[in-house]
Amino acid sequence: QKEVEQDPGPLSVPEGAIVSLNCTYSNSAFQYFMWYRQYSRKGPELLMYTYSSGNKEDGRFTAQVDKSSKYISLFIRDSQPSDSATYLCAFHYGGATNKLIFGTGTLLAVQP
Amino acid sequence: NAGVTQTPKFRVLKTGQSMTLLCAQDMNHEYMYWYRQDPGMGLRLIHYSVGEGTTAKGEVPDGYNVSRLKKQNFLLGLESAAPSQTSVYFCVARGGEMNTEAFFGQGTRLTVV
């Protein structure tokens, strides 16, 4: 079983739609949960991160973590064409282990 | 503020040639990483460093070497390039043990023919 599973998409939605992006993971040692956004031919940039189970909201974006189910989600409200990008989930163990583990990414296209 | 800068941005190599990718960061971050990104495979960790003078192997280290002689620089070397090393390479810098934000360079597109 892969440590992180993420649907590669592509996911195509109309402008204004609510988008749900998801990742499952198998390692219960993960303590930090992150979402990165990567525009075409650019490096990923951090969008949101959470430490515990629950929701975290930032503008149109909401990150949700369910540690009991080993499942994280990113919701985008009122999606815009500028949200078109690849979204990668990422995980970190915390403490002395320094590795960042990434999902394969979901390609999102928001149609105007 | 430049952040993380990778050199070069593009390169074409012939099989068997060697090259060095340079990563420079101006954020005084301790941790630096080299990842490769391939379609369907995501980001895979090649090598990483937790401070000046230290390096460690990641998930896919074979065929690569690294050095961190200065805190701000992290070099990735390809000893004898192979077509399987055709990829986009990203350098990443992160502040410290509890600092989760990782800053990416713009990437190096390497093609080995």
Image (cartoon, rainbow, N blue to C red):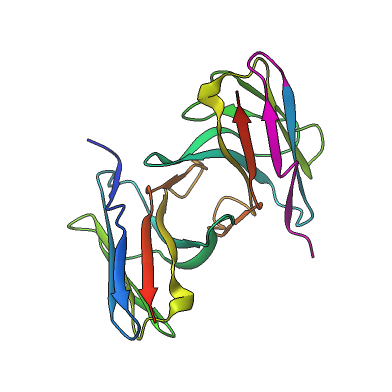
Image mark count: 0
Is residue B55 on the magenta stretch?
A: no
Give the image quarter of residue B16: top right
Residue B71 horizontal/vertical position (percent): 78, 42
Determine the residue positioned at 68% across, 25% down: B13
Quadrant in which the C terminus of chain B appears: top right
Give the image quarter of residue B86: top right
Determine the residue positioned at 46% across, 50% down: A94
- Does A97 sit left or right of B33 as displayed? left
Residue A53 visible in the displayed image:
no
Residue A31 visible in the displayed image:
yes
> Range of the magenta residues?
B1-18
Give the image quarter of residue A101: top left
Foreground residue among A10 and B104:
A10
Residue A70 horizontal/vertical position (percent): 23, 54
Determine the residue positioned at 35% across, 83% down: A15
Quadrant in which the N terminus of chain B appears: bottom right
Residue B73 horizontal/vertical position (percent): 78, 40
Determine the residue positioned at 74% across, 25% down: B19
The answer to whether residue A67 is above or below residue B44 is: below
